Image (tube, grey):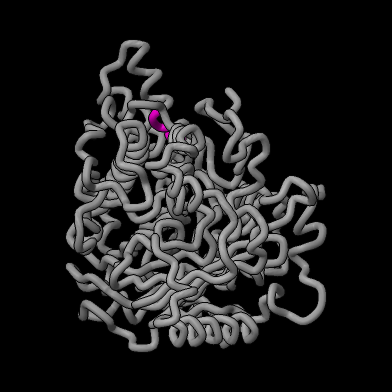
Amino acid sequence: MRFPLALLCALLVASSLQAADAKRPNLLFCFADDWGRYASAYAAVDGRPGPNDVVRTPNIDAVAKRGVLFRNAFVNAPSCTPCRSSLLTGRYFFRCNRGAILEGAVWDESLPTFPLLLRDAGYRIGKAGKVWSPGKPVDQPIGGQQYAYEKAGLAYHKFSDHATASVKAGLTVEAAKEKLLAQVRENFRSFLGAAEADKPWFFFFGPTNTHRTWAAGSGKALWGIDPDSLKGKMPGFLPDTPEVREDFADYLGEAQAYDAMVGVLMQQLKDAGLLENTVVMISGDHGAGGFPHCKCNLYDSGTGVALIAAGPEVPAGRVVDDLVSMIDLTPTFLELGGAPLPAGIDARSFVPLLHSEKSGQIDPARQWVITGRERHVGTARAGNLPYPQRALRTRDFLYIRNFAPERWPMGDPGAVTADSAPSAEVLSFNTLAGFADLDAGPMKAWLVEHRNDPQWKGAYESAFLPRPAEELYDLRRDPDQLHNLAADPSFKTAREALGAQLMEILKKSGDPRVAEGPVIFEAPPFAGAPQR
């Protein structure tokens, strides 16, 4: 039988595409809100006592053991929306138009995103939970809700709240947790069940349980984390007191809940025979909320995140020291999926790091990352202005440029001043009053309450009071970044060199903050009352 030439060509193309799809891996991206770098797999690489000695994340650790753990991964912005804008597009956050801010964010449809580019390249895509928000339209970079698999529910977004309520209603702790994990399982099962056998897939799992608030005492009640086990292991920027330790233990409990969710997904991949052909990437969008020095700050505790990957062609048991920016996820996922790169991105793929058999520093060019921030909720009540910052993080130094040092870094204090008596609203668990860029919670209330206590006044001032135009930290001697050396004459050469390097990169990248003329971030719609 003779086939028409056109039909023969079509059959050959279809055959080659099917062969390519058979080789292309499935892609699972687990991306938690406000998770930071808290997993027990990091205890061995921290180099000093810390919370990772206490938290237990066996499922995430197992992925790290099967693949690679990145010691120096950083988000581009320590705020949900701009961070996600940057990693979904491969652009610096300040090049994502209104995606560069949180309050008042609106998605720019002209920006290509890697989930939709994977879809266009033949991948079947899906999501459960948060991908891009706050902002409008919610999750638009992954097509809104058209690829959502969430019918089983999303109660696990408030894991400790719902589990605690179930225990109070009579369930055992394990049954209460399983009730929530069943939603994770069923949502992912519905996605896998609808899969086309000849198509690779990409799934974005975005839980928000590590974002405040969480149930007080839940770290111990649900996960067995004794707050006193953190004594002597708290980060240096947090007061090591019973109140703060309990709050941090509750946060670590939510990290363990995230780990349990990851375990559910891994088991499903194993049961379906998909684990060996699935690249699993695990991370979070920035540091913990409601703790000073973390979320909304350019210190490592704000921008540093866990990054763990495993899958086909990813040699196991490695720790990589290269400085990696999370904007690099866009070209990395696209390369893994055989999809073309969009024009105008600032990122570069770290697939070579995934596929290398080496540990330590692999790519000698990966010596720095850029981080920054503009508007979160709003830093000045009069005019609702941003708090503009940019930073250059190298192996040895963190250099921060604060472009408006006269402003409040965590927002206008409102009724709270150094000498005033704090209001009941400020000290309540759900406080949303002064310093709005620090999430509400017990730690914030405790620090405000103790702001005049000589022992804790310094911690209060470093968290909330205006900061100098330049900050410089020697990471070799000051890993918690507590001692600003910008005014130290012996660090003048380093400060000037790092400052010049930062400004050169920002100008080459087209950062509106350093462009000539009016700065767009200082005027509506980027500043002032959010525009509809």
Which residue is painted at 28% across and 28% down in the image? 222
Residue 211 visible, this angle: yes
Task: Give percent across and percent down for residue 379.
Answer: 67, 51
x and y, in percent, of residue 8 in the image: 52, 83
Q: Residue at x 61, y 51 (%)?
A: 139
Query: 272 above or below 66?
Result: above
Image coords of residue 291 (percent x, y)? 44, 45
Position of 129 with respect to 320 (left or right) is right
Foreground residue, 77 or 517?
A: 517
**As displayed, is residue 63 above or below residue 130?**
below
Q: Residue at x 59, y 69 (%)?
A: 469
Secondary structure predominantly adopted by residues drawn in magenta: helix
* Range of magenta residues: 156-160
Front residue of 245 and 361: 245
Whether residue 484 is in magenta: the answer is no
To which quarter of the image does residue 200 belong? bottom left
